[in-house]
Image: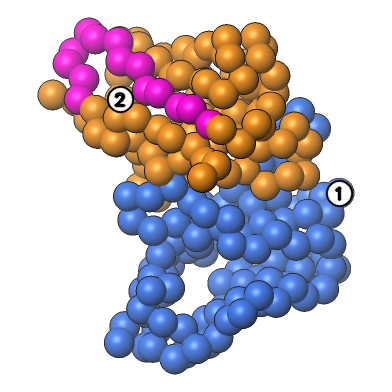
Amino acid sequence: QKEVEQDPGPLSVPEGAIVSLNCTYSNSAFQYFMWYRQYSRKGPELLMYTYSSGNKEDGRFTAQVDKSSKYISLFIRDSQPSDSATYLCARPGKAGTALIFGKGTTLSVSS
Amino acid sequence: DGGITQSPKYLFRKEGQNVTLSCEQNLNHDAMYWYRQDPGQGLRLIYYSQIVNDFQKGDIAEGYSVSREKKESFPLTVTSAQKNPTAFYLCASSIRDNNQPQHFGDGTRLSIL
């Protein structure tokens, strides 16, 4: 029950850039998707939790789910050096099991 | 503050030795999980527990063991049968509903002496 794919990067952008991070998935049965941010030597922290199709915005972050294309995206506006981290997307596993994570995309924002 | 506490932060294992990683949560979550993270491999599920006194193997359970005697505690033992234990180990917990997000501790880094 894998099937969550992410480009590992690394992705390097200058401060202030708009960043687009993407995941694809193959099982369209799931309605919820999550984005986690992981700083070096730390545990992942929940960044965004979205349901089904559409957009969800939280400050500089926007999560988008396109069910027709089976695509999950995270957009970061006005990127900051403090956004430098690994970003992981996740979807629910089968009932009674654990989340399924992508391998993560490493982002570096330079000042 | 509610959260997940993993200890120790760093751990060293000698050949042939079993070591136990601690995970405690005060979020009142029923479900708890152990993951292993290696560079380029993402998070790989070792064991998970949806309720006290019950746990299930994940994708890479060989060489590991767990117990779940209390709701707030889910210790992981890395046995001598695990031949490549050097990794970053992450514990997580969640409400017992597979649509709910998991909350993570800050990990234990295990190395071989």
Quarter of the figure with the N terminus of chain A: top right
Q: Which residues are magenta?
A: B12-25
Q: Circle 1 sits in a helix, a strand or a loop, which is it?
A: loop
- Residue at 59%, 48% (x, y): give it: A101
The answer to which image quadrant residue A111 occupies is bottom left
Q: Which chain is blue?
A: A
Mark 2 burial class by Cα count in 10 Å: few <14, some 14-19, many 20+ = few
B64 relative position to B52: left or right: left
- Residue flagged by tag 1: what amino acid is it? Ala
- Residue at 49%, 37% (x, y): give it: B4
Colour mode? by chain
Residue A2 shows in this picture? no
What secondary structure characterizes most of the magenta part? Answer: strand
Quickly name the residue at label 1. A29
- Residue A61, numbered circle: none
Q: Is residue A87 above or below residue B55?
A: below
Q: Is residue A90 above or below residue B46?
A: below
Quickly name the residue at label 2. B84
Q: Is residue A22 above or below residue A89?
A: below
